[in-house]
Every structure is written in structure tokens, then in C-alpha cells.
């Protein structure tokens, strides 16, 4: 192997990697590598530069791209300086206009959705979804073993997040690339509603991502592209722009549906 210390570094395009492996098996760890025709110019972490003949190089091992940090509800929180609008959509409901299918009623201020095994009950919430928003649903199971679904809109695509699907064994996004929750492999196993105590579900929709929190803890995240999400025909509502609720095979009581979003600039 022939190497020499460079006095000057030629101006050539650089790439980044971890190691360069020479034909004899020797490994050189470096910070930058510059292609200079028949040679490579490498610089280590201490700034020392060395020229290596390409003919003496067996392979270059590039560093793997760092994994992006995991999505969390904390990173999704709106800027504290932003002026937020927060509306409880439950008192704004006109059931005659909101009900799509099934049985919905108010019982002492609680919105109750009930559905038999044969069909689901669907209800539109009275507001179009902003581009970015938090939708907080406080809900409790009253009876039954079917699922409770929250319909969302992200990037112009309407879809659901289901809780206690598949006979209370799976929760997650309804359709991903046309595959149902039981098939796309991104579901969360286990029973969601374990008793009649209310759960506080926060769906945090941003320009490119989704985080769902339950009782203040991260529950699921999605960042695979809104165009991969869709709504099953059996979950359709009248408007493609509004959030909605679905109850199947049981009864659910909803006490709050808070829509929060940054106040638009005038």
C-alpha cells in the first residue's frame, strides 16, 4: 500500500462514511472521503488527511443513515405561543343533521351511540377538519364487545382509527394501502376498553403525521403518507371533510369531542 500525507486538499466532491477497507484487510476509520481520480483523500476525526490509491481499496463501508427520532405526543404539541381555538363539538351537534346511520341520543348531556351486531352507527361531527388539529374524545363503553372508531381527515384523506376491533383484540388505523387492520400488520393487540371507565383519546393530526395518545400516553403513530390511508365503504359518511364517530355491536358514551387548532392568521 502506498500512502502519503497531503500538504493541500484538492477541491473535489465529498461523501461521508465510517470505514475504508484496504486489500490487506486493514481498516481506516475516517470522517470524510474525497474522490480525486485514481486516489481517495480521507480525513480522520482529528483532521489528518491521507491519500490512498484506489487500487489498494477493497471496499468502502458507509455509515447507515441515522434513524429519525420516534414520533411522540410531546413533539407534536402545538407551540405554546400559538393562539389555539378549542371547541367542544358535542353541544354543537344537531342530531337530525349529524346522524348518518344507527341510534344516537343524548342522556344527561352524554352522547350515546348504540348499534346492533348487524350494522354500525355513524355520526358526523359538526366541523370540517383543519389542516392541523387535535381531536380529543372522552369515551366509555356502556355495553357490548364491538369496536369504537374515530374518523379523521389527514392531508385530504379520510380514514378511521379503530379501538377494540376484531372482537376486542386489535386497535389501530382501519385501512392502510387498502388492507384492513387485521391484515396490514400495524395494529396494536389487546383489549382497549377493559371496563366502563372513560378513556381520553387524543388524535394529533399534523401536515404529514399522526399521533394518538390515550390517557396522556402515546398509543400509536403513523408517518407513512396520507395517500396510503382510506376509508372502508362500510364506514362512509356524507362529507369527506369532517371527523366522525362509529359504534358497532354495543353502546358507547361520549362526554367530550374537543377540536383544537391554531387560530388562522387574519
Image (cartoon, rainbow, N blue to C red):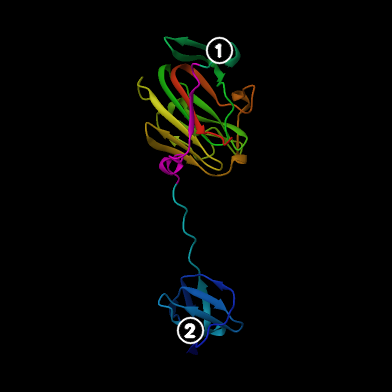
Residue lying furthest front: 266
The reply to whether the C-beta atoms of the residues labelled 2 and 1 are less than 8 Å apart is no
Start-end of magenta stretch: 71-91
Q: Residues within 10 Å of mark 2 (few under 14, many from 20)?
A: some
The quarter of the displayed image where residue 130 is located: top right
Residue 37 seen from this side: yes
Q: Which is nearer the eye, 229 or 187?
A: 229
Marks 2/1: CA distance?
75 Å
Q: Which is nearer the eye, 240 or 228?
A: 240
Whole-percent x, y for residue 163 in the image: 46, 28
Above or below 167: residue 17: below
Whole-percent x, y for residue 53 in the image: 54, 85
Whole-percent x, y for residue 266 in the image: 59, 35
Above or below 227: residue 53: below
State the SS at label 1.
helix
Question: Residue 50 has which mark?
Answer: 2
Whole-percent x, y for residue 162 in the image: 49, 29
Q: Is residue 219 magenta?
A: no
Above or below 183: residue 248: above
State the SS at label 2.
strand
- What residue do we see at 55% from left, 12% from top? 95
Question: Residue 95 has which mark?
Answer: 1
- What residue do we see at 47% from left, 15% from top? 111
Above or below 52: residue 126: above
Amino acid at each position: 500500500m502506498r500512502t502519503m500525507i497531503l500538504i493541500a486538499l484538492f477541491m473535489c466532491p465529498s461523501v461521508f462514511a465510517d470505514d475504508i477497507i484496504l486489500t490487506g484487510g486493514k481498516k481506516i476509520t475516517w470522517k470524510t472521503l474525497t474522490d480525486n481520480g485514481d486516489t481517495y483523500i480521507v480525513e480522520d476525526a482529528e483532521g489528518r488527511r491521507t491519500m490512498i490509491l484506489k487500487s489498494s481499496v477493497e471496499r468502502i463501508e458507509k455509515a447507515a443513515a441515522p434513524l429519525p427520532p420516534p414520533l411522540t405526543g410531546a413533539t407534536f404539541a402545538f407551540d405554546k405561543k400559538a393562539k389555539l381555538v378549542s371547541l367542544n363539538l358535542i353541544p354543537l351537534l344537531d342530531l337530525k343533521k349529524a346522524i348518518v346511520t344507527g341510534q344516537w341520543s343524548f342522556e344527561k348531556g352524554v352522547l350515546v351511540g348504540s348499534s346492533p351486531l348487524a350494522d354500525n352507527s355513524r355520526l358526523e361531527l359538526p366541523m370540517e377538519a383543519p389542516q392541523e388539529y387535535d381531536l380529543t374524545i372522552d369515551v366509555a363503553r356502556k355495553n357490548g364487545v364491538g369496536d369504537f372508531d374515530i374518523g379523521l381527515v389527514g392531508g385530504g384523506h379520510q380514514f378511521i382509527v379503530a379501538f377494540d376491533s376484531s372482537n376486542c383484540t386489535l386497535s389501530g388505523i382501519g385501512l392502510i394501502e387498502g388492507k384492513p387492520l387485521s391484515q396490514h400488520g400495524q395494529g396494536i393487540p389487546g383489549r382497549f376498553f377493559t371496563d366502563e371507565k372513560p378513556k381520553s383519546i387524543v388524535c394529533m393530526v399534523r401536515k404529514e403525521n399522526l399521533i394518538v395518545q390515550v390517557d396522556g400516553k402515546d398509543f400509536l403513530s403513523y408517518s407513512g403518507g396520507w395517500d396510503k390511508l382510506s376509508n372502508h365503504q362500510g364506514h362512509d359518511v356524507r362529507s369527506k371533510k369532517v371527523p366522525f364517530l362509529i359504534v358497532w355491536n354495543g353502546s358507547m358514551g361520549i362526554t367530550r369531542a374537543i377540536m383544537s387548532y391554531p387560530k388562522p392568521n387574519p
